[in-house]
Amino acid sequence: MSDIKINIQDPDGTLSTLEGPTDMGLSLMEFLKANEYEILATCGGMALCATCHVEVITGFDKLNEISNDEYAMLDTLPNITDTSRLSCQLKLASNMDNITVKIMGDGLS
């Protein structure tokens, strides 16, 4: 099976579930943008701006390890959490099935 379910928590707490393909090399950021979620992604997925910041509500332990560059970018944010990630750095993969994320943005607006 090449599709996974991604749960997105809206700011009001509502949960939506989307099915995403794991065979296209999409990042979570690209997938969310394609589904018309408001993600600026100013730097185009280079881990340089943090405008694609998400908080992983469930499934954080399933994700690939955070890189030093990603952590350094997240560390500049006022609204960082223990489970913050940059969605541009998360490629859709079977290990992400059923994770829940909340779109945080850059925390500066």
Image: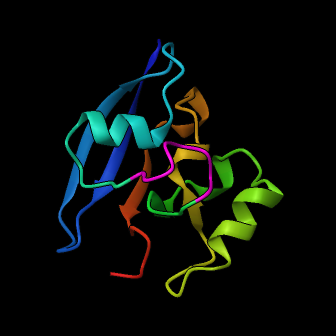
Q: Which residues are magenta?
A: 41-48
The one of 9 and 91 positioned closer to us in this rendering: 91
Q: Position of residue 96 (x, y in %)?
A: 54, 39
The quarter of the picture where residue 106 lies is bottom left
- The residue at the point 23 percent across, 37 percent down is 35
Query: Disc count in the image?
Result: 0
Q: Position of residue 101 (x, y in %)?
A: 41, 57
Q: Position of residue 52 (x, y in %)?
A: 45, 57
Its colouring scheme is: rainbow
Which residue is most to the right?
Answer: 68
Q: Position of residue 4 (x, y in %)?
A: 42, 28
The quarter of the picture where residue 103 lies is bottom left
In the displayed structure, 12 sits above or below 71; it is below
- Magenta stretch holds residue 11: no
In the displayed structure, 40 sits above or below 94; it is below
- Magenta stretch holds residue 43: yes
In the displayed structure, 109 sits above or below 18; it is below
The one of 37 and 92 positioned closer to us in this rendering: 37
- The residue at the point 73 percent across, 66 percent down is 71
Q: Relative to residue 75, is residue 17 drawn left or right? A: left
The one of 95 and 105 positioned closer to us in this rendering: 105
- The residue at the point 33 percent across, 42 percent down is 32
In the displayed structure, 18 sits above or below 71; it is above
- The residue at the point 57 percent across, 79 percent down is 81
- Prevailing secondary structure of the magenta residues: loop
Q: Relative to residue 90, is residue 21 drawn left or right? A: left
